[in-house]
Image (spheres, rainbow, N blue to C red):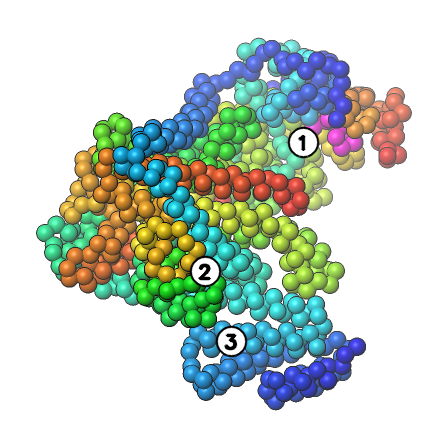
């Protein structure tokens, strides 16, 4: 059995004098020791200080400092643990460091996205942004009222079309399908639909309406159809999952009372899981409300308010943000600011929908107590 | 199982069905059939609208439709693969962190954040990509070119705007990571507690427990999550349209200012101004994209199905 | 109320698999009949075919004749939903509707069938059914609370109240005490003794003491091996079955000498 003294001495030289001493002292008496809790923290601080000091000599950079410290920390932890606690425990510690490190690395861009949108979007997050359109606006000022209204109208239209179809299909699959040929076909094609790229859904809606109304058609309802194609599979999936977890015992209890199947579904099965279905629907809406590409090719954009989805182009928030950023006017700044604000509003809408969805699922969860 | 010799013909009398039952069952079935009709419509209308482009003999595209779409397919695949390669390991790590490493409280909050990020509209990621990430990577691209320039991927000359294939790949990775994470996390959380406890009772460390009880169970979840992410990355439009400064070349050089375009990005850029046969050509390219994503999804399903027997999930 | 059940050469299938074969059995009105036998012998399947719950499983069907007071339950034009209103059922695990209060659970059968009735009539039904299920005193002050908040034994008595609220002729019980503690079990057994004054009761149980305690008649089901159909081996008065059964297999089973 390695006592830990020998290798720790070498450790001693490569790291810092203060680190290795207590480890040896505390772990010597045991055959297979364990690192004291504070050792890991000490390693981390030690690595940061050491790398920081080294970099201060050759030229400091935050990125390099963090990366090199992390590597050094992982190596030191693994080596020490291997000596003191054995190979298995050392691997365990290494994986912990790697997983945590990867997690932190992954959080950087995500937090950066949130931070950027909020800080950049704040500039034009004012009243004017919400109560005026872009009609007659050349430079500064103007707002996204027309785009917000357009987004809400088109999404509502898509929801009205897709929710009944989606929920009924899920009911068919779970309650009536019995794994029949039709049910399996529907399940398969709903899966296929889940994978349709949003731009393809847009092209489909465009192709459909241009065959009906002639080429070059741009209407709010075309966008709504495109979003419906994207939304139906999400609603079906969410509802299906929810209906499946309703215990069969409840259906049986209802049947045994002489309740017909359709009433059992409407009065027992669906109410039991209504919260879950509503949550799924909210999340589906949140998914499609931010879609840009299908609206870009089907609805286009407009400068002023248009509340009629059956007549002419409409502005929507995502497309508004895209055009404001991609083809800004002169001067550039007000357009860029409006683009970020539109992105911020869009993100807030999505967040609110998500939070509402969570609240619904919590409030309407079947009460057990 | 052996059955008795009784003839398996069903009883003649069909149970009586109530009118309400018939109506309700009928409308549910109708909704399901409607979905099939819609999907058939997607395929049919896309095909109908791309026919003029397929049959056209070089009036708009002298080199033919294939020569037009092939570089776009290349760009689509390259960007999606970069995204997948970056996102999958990170997503698995994040999912493991949430499911098995983070304290319970923190894990719950993190789950919410990941779900939220999965729902953030792609236009937001696109704006972030060009507004923040692209400028921030210029120095890094130069560094890559200086020290790793001998690898064809980083041959340069490095772009001065950062609007390169590599950056697009990273933006796509950031986009799909929450999606893969969400799927993987769900599966990891569902790993049977009994197996985990059995592993721990044998004296396994946390990592050994994860390797024994969680990862084998979650493998199909990781794969289907990754495929879902790949599908999203292939079809992603706005982030590419905004960030990439594409010229439609075919090159593996990821950091120069000459980049391949993707199908979806190209449609978004061209379609609003397109008319006549160009529209048909773009729709034809959309059809190709549809087929590619379809293949990826089928592959994912195939893998998941094949793995199911071994995953320990019933 | 309280009708007789008459099964003649009943074969019960799951798709092409014959689960129960040739059951012929007469159940007297206003008696308690216990069905006993090893797991998988088809006693629950038989029970579920009495109120046509069996056919909710895809591919499941029944051959032979099953009569309720001489009326063919599987005859052409018979609505299974209607059958279930006449033959109530209590399940293995208590299953009150989680979205409903105790009150609503009791009248669920009436309300779900859209039967219009005044508030007072509902109130009467709730009190009568809960009293009938020996639950009234325990829950009368919290009728608006969710039914799932009760203890297991109380939930099961709530389910019995729910079943008798629609005033069925027959009450089927599928191992109603298997998920309950001994005290709750005793309460249910007492209740069964009272209920037989009004209802015909058929109970499936794994507990032979329970069968001996509560039932007037006992039917013993057995199965010869995996894949073989279950059969009714013997049916007689309970004390005969437990003291001097005619079949060797029955004696082995009731005396605990069974495999």
For disc 2, the marked residue is B153
Which numbered disc, 2 or 1, marks the residue closer to the eye?
A: 2
Main SS of the magenta segment?
loop
Q: Are marks 2 and 1 in contact (CB under 8 Å)?
A: no
User: Which residue is at a point 15% across and 59% down the rendered structure image?
Assistant: A330
Q: CA distance from mark 2 to mark 1?
A: 70 Å
Please tell me whether mark 2 sits on a helix, a strand or a loop.
Answer: helix
User: Which residue is at a point 73% across and 81% down the rendered structure image?
Assistant: A4
For disc 1, the marked residue is C174
Q: Is residue B78 above or below residue A177?
A: below
Q: Position of residue B53 (x, y in %)?
A: 32, 33
User: In this rendering, does residue A234 appear at all?
Assistant: yes
For disc 3, the marked residue is A68
Which residue is more in the foreground, B197 or A347?
A: A347
Please tell me whether mark 1 sits on a helix, a strand or a loop.
Answer: strand
Q: Residues within 10 Å of mark 3 (few under 14, many from 20)?
A: some
Q: Position of residue A37 (x, y in %)?
A: 62, 77
Same chain for labels 1 and 3? Say yes or no. no
Q: CA distance from mark 2 to mark 3?
A: 24 Å
Q: CA distance from mark 1 to mark 3?
A: 67 Å
Q: Which residues are magenta?
A: C35-44
Please give left or right for residue C212 compared with residue C153 in the image.
right
User: Which residue is at a point 58% across and 35% down the rendered structure image?
Assistant: A249
């Amino acid at each position: 059995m390695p006592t830990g003294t020998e290798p720790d001495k070498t450790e001693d030289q490569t790291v810092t004098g203060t680190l290795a001493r207590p480890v040896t002292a505390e772990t010597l008496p045991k055959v297979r020791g364990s690192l004291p809790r504070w050792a890991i923290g000490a390693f981390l601080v030690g690595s940061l200080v050491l790398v920081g000091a080294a970099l201060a000599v050759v030229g400091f950079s935050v990125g390099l400092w963090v990366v090199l410290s992390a590597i050094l920390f992982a190596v030191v932890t693994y080596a020490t643990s291997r000596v003191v606690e054995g190979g298995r425990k050392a691997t365990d510690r290494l994986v912990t460091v790697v997983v945590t490190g990867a997690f932190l690395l992954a959080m950087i861009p995500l937090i950066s996205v949130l931070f950027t949108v909020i800080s950049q979007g704040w500039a034009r997050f004012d009243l004017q942004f919400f109560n005026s359109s872009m009609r007659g606006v050349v430079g500064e000022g103007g707002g996204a009222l027309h785009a917000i209204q357009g987004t809400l109208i088109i999404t509502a239209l898509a929801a009205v079309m897709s929710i009944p179809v989606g929920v009924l299909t899920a009911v068919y699959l779970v309650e009536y399908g019995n794994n029949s040929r039709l049910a399996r076909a529907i399940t398969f094609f709903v899966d296929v639909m889940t994978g349709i790229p949003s731009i393809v859904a847009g092209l489909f809606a465009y192709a459909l309406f241009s065959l009906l109304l002639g080429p070059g058609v741009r209407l709010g309802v075309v966008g709504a159809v495109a979003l419906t194609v994207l939304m139906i599979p999400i609603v079906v999936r969410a509802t299906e999952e929810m209906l499946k977890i309703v215990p069969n015992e409840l259906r049986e209890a209802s049947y045994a009372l002489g309740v017909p199947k359709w009433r059992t579904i409407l009065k027992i099965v669906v109410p039991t899981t209504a919260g879950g279905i509503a949550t799924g629907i909210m999340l589906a809406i949140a998914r499609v409300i931010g879609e840009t590409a299908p609206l870009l090719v089907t609805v286009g954009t407009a400068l002023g308010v248009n509340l009629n989805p059956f007549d002419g182009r409409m502005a929507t928030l995502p497309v508004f943000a895209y055009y404001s950023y991609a083809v800004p006017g002169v001067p550039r700044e007000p357009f860029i600011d409006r683009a970020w604000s539109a992105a911020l509003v869009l993100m807030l809408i999505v967040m609110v929908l998500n939070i509402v969805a969570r609240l619904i699922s919590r409030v309407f969860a079947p009460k057990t107590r | 199982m052996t059955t008795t010799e009784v003839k398996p013909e069903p009883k003649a009398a069909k149970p009586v069905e109530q009118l309400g039952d018939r109506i309700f069952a009928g409308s549910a079935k109708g909704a399901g059939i409607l979905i099939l009709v819609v999907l058939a419509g997607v395929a049919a209308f896309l095909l109908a609208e791309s026919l003029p482009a397929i049959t056209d003999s070089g009036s708009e595209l002298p080199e033919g439709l294939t020569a037009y779409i092939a570089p776009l397919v290349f760009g689509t695949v390259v960007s999606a693969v970069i995204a997948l390669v970056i996102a999958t390991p990170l997503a698995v790590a994040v999912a493991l962190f949430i499911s098995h490493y983070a304290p319970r409280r923190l894990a719950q909050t993190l789950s919410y954040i990941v779900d939220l990020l999965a729902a953030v509209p792609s236009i937001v990621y696109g704006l972030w990509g060009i507004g923040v990430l692209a400028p921030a990577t210029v120095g890094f691209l130069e560094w890559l070119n200086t020290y790793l320039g001998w690898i064809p991927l980083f041959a340069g000359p490095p772009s001065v705007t950062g609007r390169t294939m590599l950056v697009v790949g990273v933006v796509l990775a950031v986009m799909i990571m929450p999606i893969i994470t969400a799927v993987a996390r769900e599966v990891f959380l569902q790993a049977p507690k009994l197996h985990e406890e059995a592993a721990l009772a044998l004296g396994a460390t946390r990592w050994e427990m994860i390797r024994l009880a969680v990862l084998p169970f979650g493998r199909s979840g990781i794969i289907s999550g990754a495929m879902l992410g790949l599908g999203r990355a292939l079809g992603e439009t706005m982030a590419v349209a905004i960030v990439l400064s594409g010229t439609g070349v075919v090159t593996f050089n990821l950091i120069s200012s000459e980049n391949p375009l993707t199908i979806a990005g190209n449609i978004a850029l061209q379609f609003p101004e397109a008319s006549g046969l160009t529209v048909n050509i773009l729709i034809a390219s959309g059809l190709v994209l549809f087929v590619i994503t379809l293949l990826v999804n089928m592959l994912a399903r195939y893998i998941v199905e094949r793995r199911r027997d071994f995953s320990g999930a019933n | 109320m309280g009708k007789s059940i008459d099964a003649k050469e009943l074969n019960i299938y799951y798709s092409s698999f014959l689960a129960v074969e040739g059951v012929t059995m007469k159940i007297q009105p206003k008696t308690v009949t216990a069905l006993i036998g090893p797991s998988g012998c088809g006693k629950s399947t038989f029970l579920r075919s009495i109120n046509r719950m069996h056919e909710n499983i895809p591919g499941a069907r029944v051959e032979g004749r099953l009569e309720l007071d001489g009326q063919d339950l599987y005859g052409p034009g018979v609505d299974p939903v209607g059958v279930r209103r006449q033959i109530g059922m209590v399940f293995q695990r208590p299953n009150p509707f989680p979205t409903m209060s105790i009150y609503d659970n009791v009248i669920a059968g009436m309300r779900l069938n859209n039967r219009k009735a005044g508030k007072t009539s509902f109130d009467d039904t709730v009190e009568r059914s809960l009293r009938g299920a020996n639950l009234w005193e325990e829950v009368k002050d919290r009728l608006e609370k969710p039914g799932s908040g009760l203890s297991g034994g109380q939930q099961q008595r709530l389910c019995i109240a729910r079943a008798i609220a629609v005033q069925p002729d027959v009450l089927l019980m599928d191992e109603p005490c298997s998920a309950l503690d001994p005290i709750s079990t005793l309460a249910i057994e007492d209740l069964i003794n009272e209920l037989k004054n009004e209802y015909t009761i058929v109970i499936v149980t794994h507990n032979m003491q329970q069968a001996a305690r509560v039932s007037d008649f006992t039917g013993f089901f057995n199965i010869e091996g995996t894949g073989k159909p279950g059969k009714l081996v013997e049916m007689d008065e309970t004390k005969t079955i437990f003291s001097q059964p005619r079949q060797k297999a029955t004696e082995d089973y009731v005396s605990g000498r069974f495999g």
